[in-house]
Image (cartoon, helix red, strand yellow):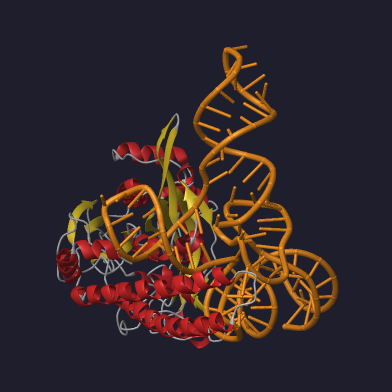
Amino acid sequence: MLDIRYIRDNPKEVQTKAEQKGYKVDVSSLLKLDNSRRELQTKTEEVRQQRNTLAEAVGKTKPSEDQIAQGKELKAQLAELEEKLRAAEEEFAKVLKTIPNMPLDYVPVGQSEDENVVSKTVGEPTKFDFEPKNHWEIAQARGWIDKERAAKVAGARFAYIKGDLARLHFALMMFGMDVLTNEDILKKIIADNGLKVSSKPFTLVMPPAVARTDVYDATCRLNKEEQTYKLADDDLWLNASAEHVMAPMYLGEILDESELPIRLVGYTTAFRREAGTYGKDMEGIFRLHQFDKLEMESFTTADDGLEEHKLMVAIQEYLMSELKVPYRVLQKCTADIGGPNAAGVDIDSWLPGQNKYRETHTADYITDYQARRMQTRVRRTMVNEPGFQAAKIELVHTNDATVFSQRPLIAIIENFQQADGTIAVPEVLWPYMSGKKVL
RNA sequence: GGAGAGGUGUCCGAGUGGUUUAAGGAAACGGUCUUGAAAACCGUCGUGCCGGCAACGGUACCCAGGGUUCGAAUCCCUGCCUCUCCGCCA
């Protein structure tokens, strides 16, 4: 959610930037709702004041007939005003939520994902002296993926991932966890990228896989039931990303600045209905209703938010480079970063089986847009001199980014396939493969 | 899942219908004293919203949402959460 005061002060900018993101919003009608809401609030508070004054005048004594009559009159007035105020606030909040976050100035303006800007390409598309297969062909031949039986059990777009492919998944997860929780590696990444951020390691988290409606909604990430699975008998939704259940961890809390940054690396199974993608990417495990994922989430001060975002991208690049999978970095344009984001980066991995780069990672910088709804704040000491100190409470900035989902498995299988049908395990994963270097 | 007891500020904890701007204590921070520290003493010590340049004023918030009342932290209802016992269970 955007700050209404910012919208009041910059209505034209908000209108323009929302449109750059492809959002149809009506800032002027929002501001009208804001005005009538505030007028009603003032009136309501005036009546409440009269009520409080009367109650105080009565005190412990028995109220007179006249006082009771007055009180009843005020109560009736208040009931009417409060109802109007409630309706006005509800309408106001509904419209305010439709205003997306403002893109940062460096985010390229674009109409669709086609206008994302490739900011970097690392490695060359892998060359083969044989015709490379796609991951689905390879996995079927090896018995690594069983979608037919999964369809029998759970329906389309589910999979049994088996044997060495399952092992490879856990190796990848372990590799990610080891990097993210290792301060020395983080220091190296920070130094190599010239970043000015804390080297505090990430804390490994296994979060709940579900969240309540109001909590999920506060993350600004809850989609409609067409997109997200809702439990039938409980007020709970299955998460569509670990980020969705880690972001609201500090809901309603005021953190101390000394606790920041809070860095979490969470492992969870994510669930997505993938409505509107029927027929797309049906082969293999590229797009499933369920997938396991390791995800970064962090809470920082506003001052550190952007550097934190850059750190997450740098970590993603480090992981990809260590795997030696060719990739490119995309600066997402205004149309593609998503409503809550101020900026966003995708990393696309080279998939020889599709002969193109496909998205395997994303990194989201959300500034204070989520934190305002979640009311996750930080108490900062701004001035601390003898005889004088001032504390300030600010919204935190949130960042999230993929460490590894299941898609990198596709990249590994396809890039490291050999003529004999086997897969060479990337060297950095050897320690996690129980001695297997070839699958 | 069944039965019972609870949920008050950073923490402990009082308050069960009306000067609650929530007692008291602890922690924290500033000061006095001290060579320094401790102790003692003095002071500060919630958040949101509305109005105001500001000082400040108003209002709401005692888990959440409803209700009763002239008046609710306090009474009633519902939900959530915690604890104890039972049941079940990786």
Q: Residue at x 53, y 85 (%)?
A: A69
Left/right placement of residue A439 relative to residue A206 reads: left
- Relative placement, left or right, of A269 versus A324 is right
Identify the residue at image location x=60%, y=78%: A63
Relative image position of residue A259 (x, y in whole percent) = 49, 45
Vertical comparison of A165 with A275: above or below: above
* Image: A162 above or below A64: above
Question: In the image, is A231 to the left or to the right of A397?
Answer: right
In the image shown, does A49 or A362 lie closer to the viewer?
A49
Residue A99 placement (x, y as % from top left): 26, 71
The answer to which of A111 and A103 lies nearer the viewer is: A103
Give the x, y percent position of residue A234: 56, 82
Name the residue nearer the viewer: A365 or A24.
A24
**Is residue A144 visible from the viewing direction of this image?**
no
As drawn, is B81 to the left or to the right of A406? right
From the viewer's perspective, is residue A192 above or below residue A408?
above
Task: Point out the image quarter for the N terminus of chain A.
Answer: bottom left
Q: Quadrant of residue A5?
A: bottom left
Q: Residue at x 48, y 70 (%)?
A: A215
**Residue A204 image point, x, y percent:** 52, 53
Q: Of residues A256 and A88, which is closer to you in this image?
A: A88
Where residue A329 sits, quadrant-wise, is bottom left
Q: Count the marks: how many?
A: 0
A137 above or below A352? Answer: below
